[in-house]
Amino acid sequence: MKKYIFIFCFVLVINLLKAQETKTHAIEGSFKSEVPMYILLKNTIDSTLLRATVCDSASYFCFDDLLAGDYYVEVSSDKKTGHLLKNNILITNNSESIVDIGEYNRIDVFIQNLSGVVIESPKRQVYEQELGKFTFNVKHSDFAKGNKAMDALRITPMVTIGLDEDIQVLGQSPTIYFNGRKSNLNKTSLVQYLKALPAGQVAKIEVITMPSAKYEAAGSGGIINIVFTRSSQMGLQGNVELNYTQLHYANYSPSINLEFNSKKWRLFANGGYNQNKNYREVAHHIVYNTSSGPQIWDKYYWARQKLNGSYFIQTGAEFFYNDNHTFYISFTGNYGKQDLFGLDTTKVYQPGNVLTDSILKTVNEDNNKNKDYAIDFYHTFKDEKRNIEWESGIGYFNSNSDGQQLLNSTTTDINNEFIGELGYMQQRTNSFRGFNAQSDLLMSVLNNSKLKTGLKYSYTDARFPLQWYDGVNGSLIENEQRSDNYKIIEHIAAAYTELMLKIHERIKIQVGLRGEYTNNQVNNVVLDNLIQKSYFQVFPTLLAQYLISNNHIIAGGVTRRIGRPNYGFLNPGKRYENPYKYSIGNPYLNAGSSINSQLMYTFKQRYSCVIFYTNGKNTIYNIPITDPVKQTVYLMPQNVGREQSISIQLNFPIGLLKNRWILSNSIRYSGSEATVPDIEYKAPWKFYWSIQHNETFKITKNGKSRIGLDFNYVSSHLYGVQTVGSMATLDINISRDFFKDRCTIKVIGRNLLDTHNQTMERMDESGSFYQKLYSNDRGFTVSLSWNFQTGFKRKTKNKQSLTEDQKGRTQL
């Protein structure tokens, strides 16, 4: 056995050394175009065509396995007459393994080439604004290493992470996508996954405020599409990252990312583990307006939330059968264990009547395990001669959550004399499973126009069995009246068509129509009570863009969205913090809808001003309600009768000191108002500021040593009908690259502003509710990242055929 291990290690070392003998390089970049274009790589000495590849809308190109030499890159519509992209790309043995020539736009390239202007490599932009979509290029920022995907979302413009880690876009709830496909993870599993996923594995985060008809209409806040990194290099490459974070508690998270590319195959696998412990303090102040006067509750609550571990894994393969057919399969899994321990101390008193004063102490233990996995299979057919692309696929998902909550409350008077005791235990075994199937067809019609149409069907089966036990004389006895079992089944069938027209050299229009049929059944298995809702709705979309000149673009659009209640909101089971405060679902919720409109002006494709307006109806929010009779406060999802919001956002990157100092800025001024008819409450217009600032300074000219700053601020604003207090975060980092940029060490100072607190308040005729959340998250992170690559040289007689094998394979 030892002999075979020695032989294996010897062969591996020899191959690694051999791979280092002949160093190869790659030239990569991106090119945006409405129609497919050829990207040409030529020899500077005799203009010989060396490689050619096809590049379409927002696609990356890459020419790999290049030896030292002098090259230049052109773009052409016929593989003959080219327009210059980048000239004099001199590669030596000491050059970097990857030469990135930057990002280009078809309009800019063609106009500037006609005037004889030589185009320089454009600056990398951290933030990009397009019609209906804002992009945070995580891979272009120094933020990628040492952080998690959840941290990247937190500093993404237009995105806020609210109380209880709710993800919001412009104050609305979005739908989360991964690589253009909808995520089926529930909220708890999604948060665990995003906290474990390294930000370095995220290429970009797209905030799509005006989704086209292709996307599902669900999500009044639009869509957040998280796109993973993808290598275009041949051979095996990957990344290993180790993070240690010291906040209130010590946490650590290792991860690994592997990818192998060959002529016919792309294999990938990544996984990681995240240990997360955090500390929270919550202070409540509740006033009930009773017939005998206001009754006041003061509550001090502290909790330690301990996430023992969260594992994730993603693996899959792409098989490039030929130039026309590609097959894709992936498996994604997530496992998390969460333990929550809380101690709740509440003072109950009435002014001027000390005899009724009492103290309620509650111990709350909640243990939960989440197990999720999803399998996806897709097939893509491309016929570039007929300009046809067809993609069809099917996916299956399964999510299980096993939990147990134990609550014990003791009431004493002001002299600490025993008054009473109450205890109970809940056991939950929630499950979600289902599948979805879709088919999309894209073809060219008329001149410079594209037609896209498709079908989709999804089925979901969600179950919420609950066993309730009352504490009696130190024993737990099942309470069948409170035990329950809810089952939710949902069918959604959809069809869409959208047409992209270029009616003039400067005018582009996209019009789409989507129809969705929904059948939703909420069944109480114990009582045999069925609540069924079926409805069909139509969702039109209109987007238009006008090119005033090469530097000035104006665009606008309008779309309709739907906000379906999530399955947890439909479950009417109660979850208590103490005997007087609990949360409850609402099986009678209706789907909300909204009309979203947007107007955008862009200058030099770098600076933009965007105006958003949303008019929503029946939007769903979890609202605290005070009950003076039962003297309780409960959180219950409600349909907001009407909601309006307006936002103005400015995006302006700045480059100083010959771009050694890059500043990316996004400022938003917003306002909203809402009305809840069921509780006769109206939240008037409230305006607020939101600022995201990201900057990087290259300490050394070669950029190997850097210092960065990430600042995020949101002033007090409305979340539904509740007023949420301001929040500000500030992180400062310093990093250094070693070993030819393969190794990076980074130190991050986290939450240096001690204002990571949020308040929430609401007031109506029945009383008022005020909550303040404090999280002690000031600390630091030390990150070590190592990139590795073992390339190989493909044997071929015709070098032009190398890129023909890569058609359709573009870096995300």
Image (spheres, rainbow, N blue to C red):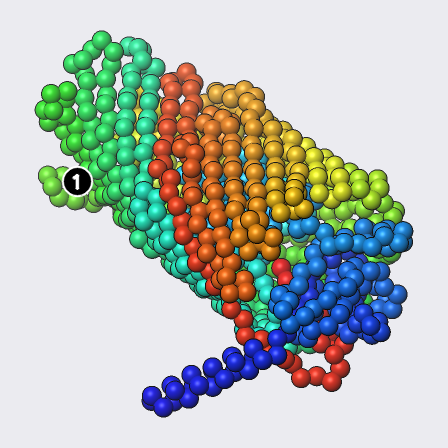
229 shown above or below 362: below
311 shown above or below 479: below
Q: Position of residue 667 (x, y in %)?
A: 61, 33
Q: Residue at x 38, y 39 (%)?
A: 778
Using the image as rendered, state which of residue 209 and residue 151 is in the foreground: 151
Q: Residue at x 57, y 42 (%)?
A: 695
From the viewer's perspective, is 628 left or right of 743? left
Which quadrant is home to the N terminus? bottom left
Residue 666 appears in view: yes
Q: Position of residue 374 (x, y in %)?
A: 48, 61
Local SS, label 1: strand
Q: Mark 1 = which residue?
A: 471
Using the image as rendered, state which of residue 272 and residue 365 is in the foreground: 272
Asked where in the image residue 165 lies, by quadrant, the reply is: top left
Looking at this view, name the residue that lies furthest to the front: 700
Q: Residues within 10 Å of mark 1 (few under 14, many from 20)?
A: some
